[in-house]
Image: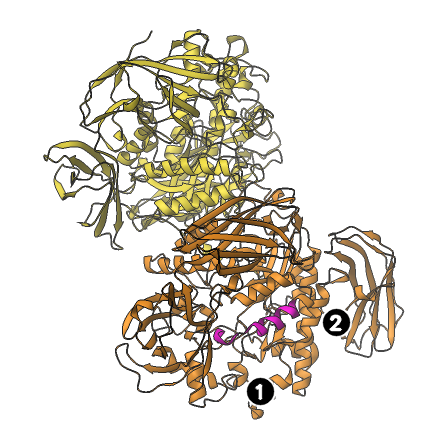
Chain colours: A orange, B yellow
Amino acid sequence: MIRISFLIIMIFSCFGSISFAENHFDLTWKLGYSKTKSEEPGKFIPATVPGAVQLDIARNEKYPPYIFDDNFKKFSWMEDMFYTYETSFKKPSLKSNERLFFTSKGIDYQFEIYINGTKVFAQEGMFTYVNVDLTDNLKDNNMLKILVFPAPKRFPFPVDRTQASNVVKPAVSYEWDWHPRLIPLGIWDETGLEVRNRSYVEDVYLNYELSSDYKKSAITILAAGKETAGSRYRWKLADANGNSVLNSEGEMQDQLSVSGISLENPRLWWPHDQGTPYLYLSTFSLLNTSGEVIQTITQKIGFKRVRLVMNEGAWAEPEDFPKTRSVPPAQFEINGRKIFAKGSNWVNPEIFPGIITKERYTELIDLAVNANLNIFRIWGGGIINKESFFEQCDEKGMLVWEEFPLACNEYPDEPHYLSILKQEATSIIKRLRKHASLALWCGGNELFNNWSGMTDQSLPLRLLNSLCLEYTPVIPFNPTSPMMGMAHGNYIFKTPQGEEVFQEMKRAHNTAYTEFGMPGMSPVEVLKQIIPEKDLFPPKPKTAWETHHAFGAWMGSTWLCPEILEDYFGKASSLEELMQQSQLMQCEGYKAIFEEARRQKPYCAMALNWCYDEPWPAAVNNSLVVYPAICKPAYFAVKNSCRPFLASASISKFRWKEGEDFFAGLWLLNDSFEQKSVQTVTMKIVSGDVTFDLLTWRPGKIKDNTNIAGPTGRLKLPHLEQRQFKLIVEVEGHPEYNSDYTLVYVPNIHAEKDKTPVLNAN
Amino acid sequence: MIRISFLIIMIFSCFGSISFAENHFDLTWKLGYSKTKSEEPGKFIPATVPGAVQLDIARNEKYPPYIFDDNFKKFSWMEDMFYTYETSFKKPSLKSNERLFFTSKGIDYQFEIYINGTKVFAQEGMFTYVNVDLTDNLKDNNMLKILVFPAPKRFPFPVDRTQASNVVKPAVSYEWDWHPRLIPLGIWDETGLEVRNRSYVEDVYLNYELSSDYKKSAITILAAGKETAGSRYRWKLADANGNSVLNSEGEMQDQLSVSGISLENPRLWWPHDQGTPYLYLSTFSLLNTSGEVIQTITQKIGFKRVRLVMNEGAWAEPEDFPKTRSVPPAQFEINGRKIFAKGSNWVNPEIFPGIITKERYTELIDLAVNANLNIFRIWGGGIINKESFFEQCDEKGMLVWEEFPLACNEYPDEPHYLSILKQEATSIIKRLRKHASLALWCGGNELFNNWSGMTDQSLPLRLLNSLCLEYTPVIPFNPTSPMMGMAHGNYIFKTPQGEEVFQEMKRAHNTAYTEFGMPGMSPVEVLKQIIPEKDLFPPKPKTAWETHHAFGAWMGSTWLCPEILEDYFGKASSLEELMQQSQLMQCEGYKAIFEEARRQKPYCAMALNWCYDEPWPAAVNNSLVVYPAICKPAYFAVKNSCRPFLASASISKFRWKEGEDFFAGLWLLNDSFEQKSVQTVTMKIVSGDVTFDLLTWRPGKIKDNTNIAGPTGRLKLPHLEQRQFKLIVEVEGHPEYNSDYTLVYVPNIHAEKDKTPVLNAN
């Protein structure tokens, strides 16, 4: 039996630490399962908490790794079992004013809790924290049991995501075009026993209102206590250096509301690319009648104002009668400053969220900050992340667009679903509203498109709008993404009709590109961990390539798209060559989209690619980061395209032929909040040893947060020896602003032999 | 002094009558005004209640009629005064268990109430009923005073509708392109004294849920009482013949909720063109401890289900990547049946809503039913109508799209405005939700267009969504009109660019046309009541024509549009001729729009013209009905175009030239829920005595609720003597399905003389 050192959980450690309870328990969990609820499990195996029932079984029964081949299919029987977690413990010695609680930050999905055979709690929903007072049912030796129900399914068939369309549980687990079908169950976040004083603070929320000039933050302390009448509270706010800047003290009440507290000249919280993500530290203490501190809750707080405002130029549309409405706003304004949102779509970094650690979040968030991204869209197909995710986004200055767990389904207007959604959403909102990084609520993913079938009239979305208004009126709310004027897709480099991403983006006119993908292969060393040696090359459908989403994932031959690769680059003769082709296509595709979206600023205000990370190693995926945290070349390409300031080329297509008039527009893209000064920018084509200068431009000063278009470089393409060439834009004296693009070249045996470059300034 | 027979108001007569209070009071109101709140009025004049302070002053000071010339401008000083209503009364003899209340269904807009010098009540908001218990402040002789504040203005300038952008008061009063600036103030709905038993029922609401097959209605009685503990209630539901079908009896509570009541096979409520607007009668009685009935509340109830569902074909859009969302639903489904909404935009039928009577509503609603209209959009620029409006819509089967009082302004996210909006909207929702006719809530008019500047993030609209969800989840909610895919406008026959309404509608592709206008002149006898004799002809700007919106109202030379009339018809030589031209244009324009919108079914599901009625006689207006209830020729044209079944011609333009190839498509439009059978339809052109047959069509059966397109009739236009011709479509044996259209003809002196009609069947 694995012994798990069982800490007294710091409940509300989401808000920092609570100092009063320092007892430790050594607890051991075991797990059993049965086909029916009434049946007792035949045997028990050691359980890891937090984790997932599947992982315990796989460990105990020595299942091969689920990332390899189609091993994950071995788990499917586990969907329909009832699971029993059990642990026994001796009653701790409790003072007369102490109570023993069972607490959990997450049990997935429907469950009942028994102490010594008595049912003391039941819940449907994995995001509402559990707090059960066990005291009155304690014996000297206690048996705690958690009965977890089978994976919820709206109906037995079809076996797909629609089974999750009436539960507040990530739909992605039911299978997606980049995610295997594996439906986690069990205890998935910090869980344990906690000794609480009878007089106890359950929650502290600092509500604040910034004055319009940002010079004052009016703070209201809202604290919810139990049996706290007669106690006192003491509160202080310290700056990042630990200096106390505000404090308050008074009589505690079960529903405490202290207003009239004002912070003058607050340092504002900014996303990392706009300033410092400045955080203050709040310390709230509960004092007993003797004036002793019996509980302390600390939490960080950042002061910011976020709004979604109209995109520049959007009010001028539509022009014609009969006239419909203007598009909804999709321009983030942070502390009064309009910013271009450069981001990525975050998906669960593990198939089983129970094993996501703070460190997993750290490496992924750090990489995103490093890639010049300022926002994560937490896609509605996945979980609501653990507290350590938001704590780090707060600290590191990443904005968070948070979706509720609804995606690509028609979630119903049914009373039971609505009641669970209300419970879960309320818990989610009350937890996340404390975080400075929270920038946008969103009902879920693609709910207003035909594959989902929800509409503005759908009660689940009206309910979410209503709850967000009640608890966080200062945070914008969108019922879904895309909204009118925003767009999702495309996810391929070239359509079957022959339109490349270059042309598609140039004809697009959207306020925000909040999903767009470009598939790229994982590195060969990763592929070897997931695909049997014999199947590695050439990739074929009906092998581990397909279970890992290289074939038959989405439309056409996604995500490998071999015919597109072969068309541009010729047939690959090795896995390494194929990988390079695929990764080059991903790099150039993502550069084309991110930079074109930025050129469409200020009408366009967001570019968020699909997707950032992945929960297991896919063979081919639109992700920038391969599981667990391996950067693809596309990661670096996107990092470059998202620099606050860069020289960029506007290119109209990927493949060029000998003799063709090549042309590309030169731009300087400035998302930074400084004026930039650039003396000389040049554009050239390099093919092997040959270089052709296309233009020299002397732009001078570039206003803050403003792009400027420069001249167009032109060249009648001469005969070149290589099948690819590079277009390079260089800023003299500032290599950090340079960009380059790899393009495909087709020699023409009939082309003129005149190799003189033609320079054209228009 | 005018003596007003002052009934004890039947409070909740909205729900029928209350029988316990039958005392009468003879009360007399008088009115005074002052420049400041503290100042006493210099004198008092007789007041009519309900009414408006302006009407009392005008009557007393013998102002000329405000409808004539620019007389309304004489009222402008009244905007900024404080008004005092006073009445005195002897204390009635009250039994020990009785209380005397002051009750009012509407005081406009901000006010305070004093009894014998003591302030007992204050309110901002004209739609929340007032109930003030005066008992404890009564003397033998009592002075009741209502102090009404000046017209609210967000700022002194500009003097326009934006002054109303932070109040829940109709913006239209601040001037509109068809409404003079006249801002009503004062007591505008039933008001008086009421003796109540101490034990009293304040509200009864029958909430019901229809089963999906409509075979069962599960009813919950929700009653709110005061000091009703120990009392009992008795409730019965009777059918339209007075036969009791359900009853319930039990102990009364201050918050009574009685569920588990089920009506089997309820007769459903239908809009008048779909079935019977069947109403049941609910009688709720409060019994004292002796079992005597001390209060009875009756109300009618109709059982229906209304939904907004996706328009047919709308899920298939958008097609391309990057892909935005699909349009929101704009297809009404009533009791499971998709219906085409044919309606009109309702505006206040009086400048001063205090003088709207039940009879005014009756004549206007009856005319709309008679015109084959099935829905009113109660436009957000006006008031929330009085109870007698909704009672009649319930009885007569008119659907009601109800907007909150927000229109064409940027209503702010300010706490004070939001608190008044919450109070008023809650009152409105709780009152109107009892009505079977209620089909749609809407936040207000054109709020998501640039002239308003609100967005999906605006808190007032999020609040309204939230309140409607809380109190009426079964009624659809739209934040504004137009929504994405819906459209407003145009409001002129031909644009300055030369596009006629015929072409505009053919290129339009909208789910719902919820506003479109076509100006037409009022009859000459009406014009004589509003325009000085000397200015009658020719109409000129800067005269009463302009104050009555013939010039400078909206874009261009609206609403007279003389250059369009002259272009089509030549210069009119008399007022009568000009009126005929204008009215013809209005008729043909409205026919073109209504019938084209119907041809676009099922993608299109609504056609609602701007506007139905008017609050004073405009010289020229888009209305169908001239103040007070005079039908324009366009009324009859629209009535014809809205027949459930008709033959219709699809015409591409208004003016045709000699020698041109005339063509028109023949359609049969069926909004009825019966299959129709038509043997023979013909199309012909008639000019004076000459007739040209264009085609004969034998369509056979036409499915219920379905249109069919027939052949196109063609004719090379010969030389004709007259400058107009008629296109006539006739259904053999069914003259009630015939249609005709008047078109303009231009002879060509160079045209060929070949007058042989060319019949072309393709």
Vertically, is B444 above or below A628? above
Residue that lies at the very extreme toward the front in this rendered image? A290
Specify whether disc 2 shares its chain with disc 1.
yes
Residue carrying label 2: A743
Q: How many marks?
A: 2
Quadrant position of residue A80: bottom left
Q: Position of residue A240 (x, y in %)?
A: 65, 58
Q: Secondary structure at mark 1?
A: helix
How would you classify the magenta stretch by its main secondary structure?
A: helix
Dot 2 or dot 1: first in sequence order is 1
Mark 2, Cα crowd under 10 Å, few <14 / some 14-19 / many 20+, is many
Which of the pair B533/B179 is nearer the observer?
B179
The CA distance from mark 2 to mark 1 is 32 Å
Rendered image: mark on residue A529: 1
* Residue B614: in magenta span: no
Q: Is residue A431 left or right of residue A275?
A: left
Q: Quadrant of the N terminus of chain A?
A: bottom left
Give B394 or A678, whichever is nearer the viewer.
A678
Q: Is residue A510 above or below residue A27?
A: above
Quick one: B435 or A557, which is closer to the camera?
Answer: B435
Q: Residue A443 in the image: x percent, y percent?
A: 48, 57
Q: SS at mark 2?
A: strand
The stretch in magenta equals A352-368
Residue B681 is situated, as x and y percent measured from the top left of the image, at 36, 42
